[in-house]
């Protein structure tokens, strides 16, 4: 992994690498040491206009939408194979730019990226149109057509994986796309688009416009030539895309936003060792920079003392190190401003009376990186900010309840509704809790998001309008058309 990487820093529009029209660039940093990695093309409205024109031309006049689903499938499978062949390169790019542990990039993110593209490719020619039961004198067809030009706005916490979650169904259905990567993590997305061209995806089908949200992201959100926006990120920015749509062409907006997800430990939970394993993995994996992490543990009061002892043991396993060190399990946070935000949440929790029992500090300061140690608070009340606000870091709040009904009520005491986990030895208790908790995904006796075949998305401030993953993701990038033929 020590080879010299060839950083890709330019926009990709109509199959060509391009500087920003203005000639401007911005710096992307290595969060493990705060040093500049490269200067990336800083796209703005003029670049967005060019990218939309290229995507529109590829959609209206290019071969991609006109191909049969089986033809698109072959090319997308080739694309997945190329991504797999470049696993080491892409993993190292992601580890360096996003601060993600290299072992996670190689063992989790890249395999899921490849698998996602392959799964949606294979689904392309398995989804059927319909005939309605309209009588013998009529042929009534309900057909699916690609929605058109899609803008996919990506987050910085899982750059390649989230790109695949968008690209798989968008491309399989015959759309064209403009990817706007987070400004902190542009290079792996740019490289992905180059591999797509190499795989045979026609020019203009995938375009990448790096830059800042208030410049190129806003321009895409307001653009009259965009038919759909698929967004993954904060609830605050998700609201903006709804406004952009309302103020422009009422483009479809699909939002996957934040979460303040509960892990509910019922009094009959069978094995607290297992609960502690899943609780630690949920909040510390990817440095807690994960919208689906269980950042609230709601546990029956009779189990709390034993659980905390086991959980504190697990924190020793989360080695903090440079992301390129294979021993690293906890890398740096994405940038200095985000680190300061996480640390401010920790200080606020202390002032509100939560009991800090682990961590709470910035560490490895000599590296210049943005490292925060695993942090756990006990004696948290439901009204404290740490129980309400999404922190997006390795910070866990522990709350207690006395009855299963109280635990479920506490789980639902949030404006979010993305994921939840329930631990119980009783199938009846677990099933009732899973049905009553308002969240898009509820896992039982584990922390999990399902797999590629299960829809992912949430309720409330966690977003709406569609789902990532599964066949449901294909539906949101299609329009349904009724063709009514009078045969009498």
Image: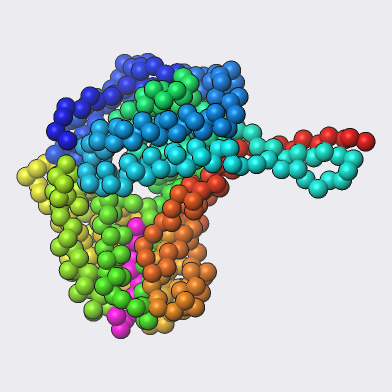
Q: Return the residue nearer the eye: 342 or 395.
A: 395
Is residue 302 within the magenta segment?
A: yes
Q: Residue at x 35, y 38 (%)?
A: 160
Q: Residue at x 43, y 53 (%)?
A: 451
Q: Residue at x 84, y 46 (%)?
A: 134
The single residue placed furthest to the right in the displayed view is 488
Work out whether 365 lies above or below 82: below
Judge from the rendering whether residue 149 lies leftward or rightward of residue 347; answer left or right.
right
Is residue 445 within the magenta segment?
A: no
Judge from the rendering whether residue 400 lies leftward or rightward of residue 143; answer left or right.
left
Q: Residue at x 89, y 35 (%)?
A: 487
Residue 247 x %, y %: 56, 34
The single residue placed furthest to the left in the displayed view is 366
Quadrant in the rendering for residue 407: bottom left
- The answer to whether any part of residue 471 appears in the image is yes
Image coloring type: rainbow
Residue 449 x %, y %: 41, 56
Work out whether 383 lies above or below 484: below
Quadrant of the image for the C terminus?
A: top right
Residue 288 x %, y %: 28, 54
Residue 472 x %, y %: 56, 47
Q: Return the residue nearer the eye: 47 or 346.
A: 47
- The answer to whether any part of residue 245 appears in the image is no
Judge from the rendering whether residue 252 lies leftward or rightward of residue 442; answer left or right.
right
Q: Tag count in the figure?
A: 0
Quadrant of the image for the N terminus?
A: top left
Quadrant in the rendering for residue 385: bottom left
Q: Which residues are magenta?
A: 293-303
Judge from the rendering whether residue 431 lies leftward or rightward of residue 367; answer left or right.
right
């Amino acid at each position: 992994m020590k080879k010299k990487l060839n950083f890709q820093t330019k926009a990709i529009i109509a199959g060509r690498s391009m500087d920003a029209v203005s000639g401007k660039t911005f710096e992307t940093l290595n969060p493990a040491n705060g040093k500049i990695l490269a200067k990336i093309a800083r796209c703005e409205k003029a670049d967005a206009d060019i990218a939309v024109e290229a995507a529109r031309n590829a959609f209206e006049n290019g071969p991609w939408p006109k191909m049969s689903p089986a033809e698109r499938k072959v090319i997308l499978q080739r694309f997945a194979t190329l991504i797999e062949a470049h696993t080491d390169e892409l993993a190292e790019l992601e580890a360096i730019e996003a601060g993600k542990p290299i072992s996670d990039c190689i063992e989790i993110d890249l395999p899921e990226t490849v698998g996602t593209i392959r799964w949606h490719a294979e689904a392309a020619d398995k989804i059927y149109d319909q005939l309605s039961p309209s009588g013998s004198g009529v042929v009534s067809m309900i057909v699916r057509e690609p929605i058109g030009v899609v803008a996919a706005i990506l987050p910085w916490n899982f750059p390649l994986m989230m790109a695949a979650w968008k690209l798989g169904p968008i491309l399989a259905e015959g759309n064209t796309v403009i990817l706007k990567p987070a400004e902190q993590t542009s290079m792996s997305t740019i490289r992905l688009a180059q591999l797509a061209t190499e795989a045979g995806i026609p020019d203009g089908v995938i375009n990448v416009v790096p830059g800042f949200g208030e410049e190129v992201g806003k321009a895409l959100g307001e653009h009259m030539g965009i038919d759909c926006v698929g967004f993954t990120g904060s609830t605050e920015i998700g609201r903006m895309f709804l406004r952009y749509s309302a103020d422009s062409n009422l483009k479809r907006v699909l939002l996957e936003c934040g979460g303040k997800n509960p892990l509910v430990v019922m009094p009959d939970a069978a094995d607290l060792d297992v609960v502690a394993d899943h609780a630690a993995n949920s909040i510390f994996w990817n440095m807690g920079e994960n919208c689906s992490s269980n950042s609230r543990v709601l546990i029956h009061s009779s189990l709390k003392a034993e659980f905390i002892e086991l959980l504190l043991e697990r924190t020793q396993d989360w080695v903090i190190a440079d992301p390129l060190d294979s021993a690293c399990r906890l890398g740096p946070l994405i940038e200095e401003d985000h680190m300061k935000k996480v640390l401010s949440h920790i200080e606020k929790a202390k002032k509100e009376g939560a009991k800090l029992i682990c961590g709470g500090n910035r560490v490895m300061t000599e590296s210049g990186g943005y490292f925060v140690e695993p942090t756990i608070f006990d004696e948290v009340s439901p009204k404290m900010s740490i129980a309400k606000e999404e922190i997006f870091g390795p910070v866990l709040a522990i709350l207690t309840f006395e009855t299963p009904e109280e635990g479920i009520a506490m789980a639902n005491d949030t404006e979010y509704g993305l994921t939840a986990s329930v631990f119980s030895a009783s199938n009846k208790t677990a099933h009732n809790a899973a049905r009553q908790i308002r969240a898009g995904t509820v896992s039982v006796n584990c922390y999990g998001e399902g797999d590629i075949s299960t829809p992912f998305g949430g309720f409330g401030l966690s977003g709406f309008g569609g789902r990532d993953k599964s066949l449901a993701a294909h539906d949101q990038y299609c329009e349904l058309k009724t063709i009514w033929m009078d045969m009498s």
